Image (cartoon, rainbow, N blue to C red):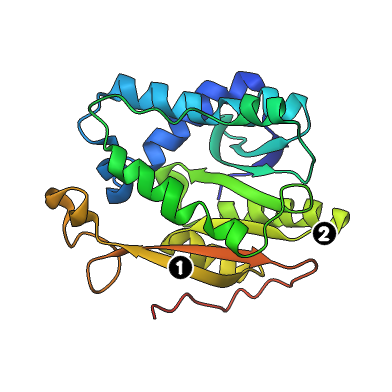
């Protein structure tokens, strides 16, 4: 395995982070559902506007951090993750770090709204407090680097930071991500299922569950929770 190192992401990493996201989601059916018939340029622009605050203004005001894992043989960013930090923000600061999430007409607005209105609120429902807790904000690994444990390394880094501050970490994840988080001390609090065909008939039955739906899980890691590499995600 190539040597990998972990570093905090900086503004000049933004374009490469966008590329990692786009490549990681190229075959992801839920992402393709939301992208609709958007062009590659439109997709790139949407992703860039979504994550810009995670390496720029959000970092400047101490509200967000992004961490990258780099393949030292070629200096490529193999993967990255972002996390919101416990901090009291003014209304203006919240506006500054909140992306518009506006899709062009070619995008699937109903798919985006499902994420915003059905998945997003689960954290607050289960006690998430932006002033007291950490919350993961995206985790991406290039396809050629997947299944090498790189995201678990990044997760361990975030967990160490959270433990040092005595704060829990929340995360929303689908099957592959949720399985990785379980191994790093997270517990599932709740989930919501989606039949993608209800938002676009072309995607009916193409989810990862046996019934053809896709599942979005909310997980939380308490301070000091230990890694359990033997744990496996079980469909319920």
Is 136 on the left-hand or right-hand side of 39? right
Label 1 or label 2, whichever lies nearer to me, is 1
x, y percentage for residue 67? 66, 39
Q: Which residue: 26% across, 38% down?
A: 108
x, y percentage for residue 207? 26, 61
Residue 54 versus residue 14: which sits nearer the camera? 54
- Which picture quadrant has residue 208? bottom left
Q: Which residue: 16% across, 58% down?
A: 204
Residue 233 vertical position relative to residue 138 in the rendered view, above or below: below
Q: Would residue 55 be visible to someone looking at this image? A: no
Residue 52 versus residue 99: which sits nearer the camera? 99
Residue 103 versus residue 30: which sits nearer the camera? 103
Q: Would residue 199 be visible to someone looking at this image? A: yes
Spatial distance from mark 1 to mark 2, Cα to Cα? 25 Å
Provide the residue designation for mark 1.
191
x, y percentage for residue 213? 27, 65
Is 50 on the left-hand or right-hand side of 62? left
Residue 224 versus residue 227: which sits nearer the camera? 224
Q: Which residue: 65% across, 55% down?
A: 155
**Mark 2 surroundings within 10 Å by alpha-carbon count, few (fewer than 14), some (14 through 19), many (20 or more):** some
Provide the residue designation for mark 2.
163
């Amino acid at each position: 395995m190539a040597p990998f190192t972990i570093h905090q992401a900086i503004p000049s990493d933004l374009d490469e982070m966008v590329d990692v996201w786009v490549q990681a989601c190229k075959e992801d059916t839920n992402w393709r559902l939301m992208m609709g018939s958007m062009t590659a340029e439109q997709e790139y622009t949407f992703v860039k506007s979504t994550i810009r605050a995670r390496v720029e203004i959000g970092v400047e005001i101490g509200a967000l951090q992004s961490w990258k894992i780099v393949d030292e043989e070629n200096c490529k960013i193999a993967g990255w993750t972002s996390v919101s930090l416990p901090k009291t923000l003014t209304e203006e600061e919240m506006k500054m770090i909140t992306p518009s999430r506006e899709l062009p007409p070619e995008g699937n607005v109903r798919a985006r709204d499902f994420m915003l209105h059905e998945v997003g609120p689960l954290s607050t429902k289960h006690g998430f407090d932006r002033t007291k807790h950490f919350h993961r904000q995206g985790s991406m690994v290039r396809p050629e680097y997947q299944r090498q444990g790189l995201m678990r390394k990044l997760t361990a880094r975030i967990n160490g930071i959270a433990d040092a501050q005595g704060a829990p970490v929340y995360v929303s994840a689908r099957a592959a991500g949720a399985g990785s988080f379980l191994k790093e001390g997270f517990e599932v609090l709740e989930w919501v299922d989606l039949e993608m065909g209800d938002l676009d008939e072309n995607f009916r039955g193409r989810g990862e569950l046996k019934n053809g739906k896709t599942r979005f899980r909310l997980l939380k890691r308490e301070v000091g929770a230990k890694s359990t590499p033997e744990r496996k995600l079980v469909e319920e």
